Amino acid sequence: MKIDRLIARRWVIGLSGVVLLGALAFVALRSGPMAPTRVTVIQVSQGSLAPDLFGIGIVQARRAYFVGPTSPGRVRKVSVDVGDSVKAGQLLAEMDPVDLDERASALDASIARAGSAVTAMNAQRQDALARREIAIANAKRYAHLGGQGFISAGGVEAKLQERTSADAAVTGAQANIAAARQDLQRLGAERMAIKVQRDNLRLLAPGDGVVVARDAEPGSTVVAGQAVVRMIEPSSLWITVRLDQGRSTGLAAGLPAQIVLRSNPAAPLSGRVARVESLSDSVTEERIAQVVFDRLPPALTMGELAEVTLGLPKTATAVVVPNASLRRLDGRVGVWIVDDGALHFAPVRVGQTSLDGQVQILQGLEPGQRIVVYSEKDLTAASRIKVVDRLMDAQP
């Protein structure tokens, strides 16, 4: 009896060990390192993509004006404030004229004096002309009398010399008049230059717009070209958008755009591409486009960030797969194809990509094939897999 009990106990212990080893093997094969890799699989289908472009932009003004003096000076007054709407030709600010007014008065006096000089020269010319007429008449008469022997040859020569002197006096008077007129013209040009300088001290609005900054206050000194007031045309606001060069195929003027401003993300706005810049950013590998609003929103501010989506034409019908299914193996891009539970890697040629994560496959896949989308870990051709609906909900 004792021996039978001992044998029975050994059988129970042995059977328990076998069961335990079987349970450990089952667990190892189902959830341990030897367990199959859980994957999600889809069947390849055909379709067309809308390869939209997405970029971040900044609201800027197409027409902005930096209004300042053309020569250094001191600001006398600033007539507008930030946010004021102004009309073309409206006074924005004025510079201190210093001595321009006095110089203008001095030139006015010089111009008057030059005018008097021209008048005096004209009078001298008239006198010279009259003297020449008399000299011509006397020279003719004396020459006639000299020919008849009534006057000596010396007397005739004296009258001829008077005629020559009278001609020279007329020529001199005409030259003096020309010089006086040139001097008057010079003074007039200098006076006009003073007027232009004086007018340039009045900083006028070049067009209708809104003042966005006052860069100088009364009493401050500015250099030539420095802005005193900055203004923009609100109707010229647009968005400078930066787009990835690698996905910018098809970018062109006229593309429709959806604009989401940071200040109001719940209200998308419509627009279009007005211009594509010819110069790209080689550092950030981005292309730059200018997008205008179909209708300007109220209270739009410069410098605001905006998310811009550009709509490109749909692609031709082709094989379409999720971007997550693409893998890189030995430097080649491809997908894992599932065929009767076995895996093999298929290199593919990728086309356009949509913003929702779909990729156009130009070569390497056929409709109806099953491919791996997500997997718990990296796969190889020898990997054992288990197809599940969702990785997060799969149970071992």
Image (cartoon, rainbow, N blue to C red):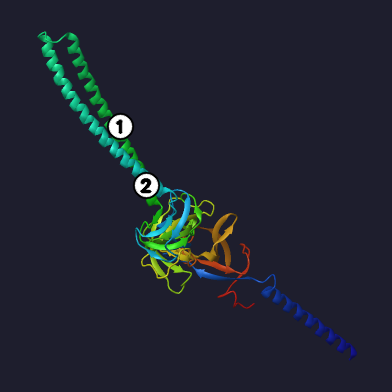
Answer with the quarter of the image where residue 156 lies.
top left
Please state which of residues 327 and 236 is positioned toward the viewer in this rendering: 236
Q: Regarding mark 2 in the picture, which secondary structure is present there? A: helix
Q: Residue at x 40, y 45 (%)?
A: 103
Please state which of residues 31 and 321 is positioned toward the viewer in this rendering: 321
Residue 105: mark: 2
> How packed is label 1: few (under 14 Cα within 10 Å), some, or many (20 or more)?
some
What is the three-letter code of the residue carrying label 1? Answer: Ala
Q: Which residue is mark 1?
A: 179
Answer with the quarter of the image where residue 110 lies.
top left
Residue 164 drawn at (x, y percent): 22, 19
Residue 75 drawn at (x, y percent): 47, 56
Residue 310 drawn at (x, y percent): 42, 63
Please state which of residues 28 and 97 is positioned toward the viewer in this rendering: 97
Q: Residue at x 22, y 22 (%)?
A: 166
Q: Could you tell which of marks 2 and 1 lies nearer the N-terminus?
A: 2
What is the three-letter code of the residue carrying label 2? Answer: Ser
Q: Is residue 262 left or right of residue 203?
A: right
